Every structure is written in C-alpha cells, then in structure tokens.
Image (spheres, grey):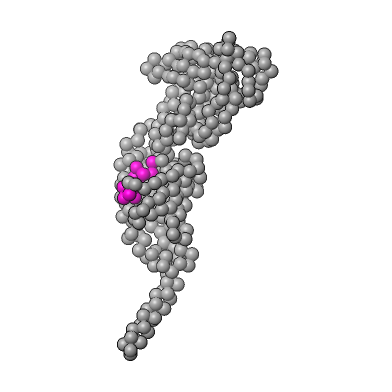
Amino acid sequence: MRVLKWLVIVVAILIVAAIGIGFVLPDRASLERSVVVDAPPATVYTALNGFRQFNHWSPWAALDPDAVYLHEGPPVGVGAKMSWRSDDPSVGSGSQEIVETVPFERVRMRLEFEGFDSENYASLSLEPEGEGTRVTWGYDTRFHGDLLGRYFGLMLDGMLGPFYERGLAALQSFVETLPVEDISNLEVDVIEVEPRPIVYLSAAAGPDDAAQVLAAAHARLAAHLAANGLQRSAPPIAITREYNEETGAWRFDAAMIVNRADPPADEAQGIRSGQRYSGWVARAAHTGPYETSAVTYRQLLAWRSAAGLEDNGDSWEQYPGDPAATEQPSMYVFWPIR
C-alpha cells in the first residue's frame, strides 16, 4: 500500500507539474517554409488565389484518394472556400477559406479542423526573385489557453514542416508547367452576373469586316428598340458562338440588353429575344483598338488555365466606349467559368 501511495503522489506531482508548465508555454505556434518557383508572381498568385488547383500540389491529397471535397463561394479571391471530409486520420475533415488577398503578393486563409477549437491561419506570400518568385508558406495557430494545444505547439514544426516542404516542391513543379504568358497587366475580375433580357440577331464576319458588320447589326437592333418603345439598359454586346483562330472567321450574336422582361422579337428581320447568361464570369478589360484584343484573349486564357477554371458557356464582349480609346477600357470580355 505504501508503494501505491507514493506512486499516486508521484503521478499527482507530475500532473501538477505538467499543468504548471503548460500555463507558461506559448499560446501560439507558427512555422514557415519557402521555395523559388520559375514563374512570375502574377502566374503564381493566380494559381494560389483559389482552391481549384490546390490538390495538384497539396501534400495531403494523395494520402486519401477517397476524400470528398466541396467548393463554395466565389471561384477565386476572398470568400472562396474548400471543405474536405476523410476517414483517414492523417487527413481528417475541415475547411479553408480565403480571407485576405493582395494581388501578386499574398493570399491568407482561415482553416478549421473538425474536433479542434484552435484559431488557424495559413498564408502564401510572394516575392520576385531573379526571373522567378519566392513562395513562403506560413502557418499560425492560437490555442486560446488549451494546455494540450500548447504542448502540441512544441511539436508543430517537426510534424507539419515536412508536409509543407513536400507541398512546396509539388507547387514548384506544377506551376512551372502552366502557360508562359505575361498576365501581370491583365485587368480581370470574377463576378456573378444575373440573367438579363436581350434582343439579338445572328451574324458572321471575317477579320477585315468584323467592326462594320457588328456596327450594322447593332444599328438594326437600335432601330428595333426605338420602334417598340424599348430602352437599352447596358452597353451593346456581342456573344461569340464560334471563332476560327486560323482564318479569323467569327460567328456571333449582336445583342442589346433591354429594360423589359419579355421584349418583342421580329422574326422577319431575324431579331429574336432571349436571356443573357447568368452565373460566374471572368471579366477582363481591354484598352485600345479592337484589333489588339487578341492579346487580351490570350492573357485571359492563360489566367483561366492558371486558376484551374473551366468554360461554362459562350463568352461575350461589351462595348462601353470608343474602340479607338487608349486610356479607358474600350471593351470588356466576359467569360463564363466554373
């Protein structure tokens, strides 16, 4: 009994000591790892400013191929969220959501892990380095007084550091396969558009007469609006139905967004009514003559590829100003994405 008594005393002392030490341990822990990627900051940032590409380089994705992932919110930027659920304890279940972005410099995410009450943030910081970009992946967690969490913090770097190193190596390999196109000056937003009533007519043109054919089509639509008491509620648009990159042949619908939900058509004149696409789009601004818009399209395609987004319908152009303008956007390209 005496031995048992002393054993209980020793255990009690150890417990008290562990609790006492826990109170003086740091209430937060952090780690960082970095790698240099042979790609410009704009490309790297675009790949990281959302979660569509995450599993191409995540060190945890291969641990459980049966894990279930759910994307919520906007496709990119603040509010983009990815949740995961796995029966593998090394993957677990949780979510991460982008809470802050600085274009070409930083993406910050809030992470939640099922069964844990800690406050967790990860960040991906970018700095130009030579011809490439230094990517620093950081992690910061606060335990809010949880003693077991504080002890876990002592082991955080050793446990999580190797995963970060593998992830950055995979990120380096992945990003370096993305299209080589300078997108640093591309003005692109991701927005959600509502359905809008339109009147439209179909047309076709080649590279030499596209502007004239489009202008004539919009003039016919303007006359139709005037004859039917309709008003245009947005700048004119052209919805691309088919484009041949080799010949420049363009098949499109010239359209006007109007102020009535059920605008009348004129089948005899080839004028129809319908609805414009609704959903998420990438909107890119083009400044300057229309003839140089091919550069904007190439940049937008490279951006979409880097972001890991897919087509979700026919793109359209909107013409808010003078096509010859050199300072203000003369055209916006809207590309449906998912």
In the image, 205 versus 179, the foreground residue is: 205
The residue most toward the right is 229
Residue under the image location 49 percent in, 18 percent down: 252
Q: Position of residue 223 (x, y in %)?
A: 63, 13
Quadrant of the rendered image containing residue 243: top left
User: Is residue 307 shown to the viewer in this render?
Assistant: yes
Q: Is residue 93 above or below residue 328?
A: below
Residue under the image location 41 percent in, 53 percent down: 93
Is-magenta flag for residue 62? Answer: yes
Q: How many marks?
A: 0
Residue under the image location 53 percent in, 35 percent down: 191
Q: Quadrant of the N terminus?
A: bottom left
In the image, 150 versus 266, the foreground residue is: 266
Residue under the image location 53 percent in, 28 percent down: 277
Is-magenta flag for residue 9? Answer: no
In this picture, which residue range is highlighted in magenta?
53-64
Q: Is residue 139 above or below residue 263?
A: below
Quadrant of the rendered image containing residue 183: top left
Q: Position of residue 159 (x, y in %)?
A: 33, 59
The residue most toward the bottom is 2
Q: Position of residue 135 (x, y in %)?
A: 37, 47
Q: Position of residue 187 (x, y in %)?
A: 49, 33
Quadrant of the rendered image containing residue 338: top left
User: Is residue 233 shown to the viewer in this render?
Assistant: no
In the image, 132 versus 1, the foreground residue is: 1
Q: Is residue 21 above or below residue 35?
A: below
The residue most toward the top is 268
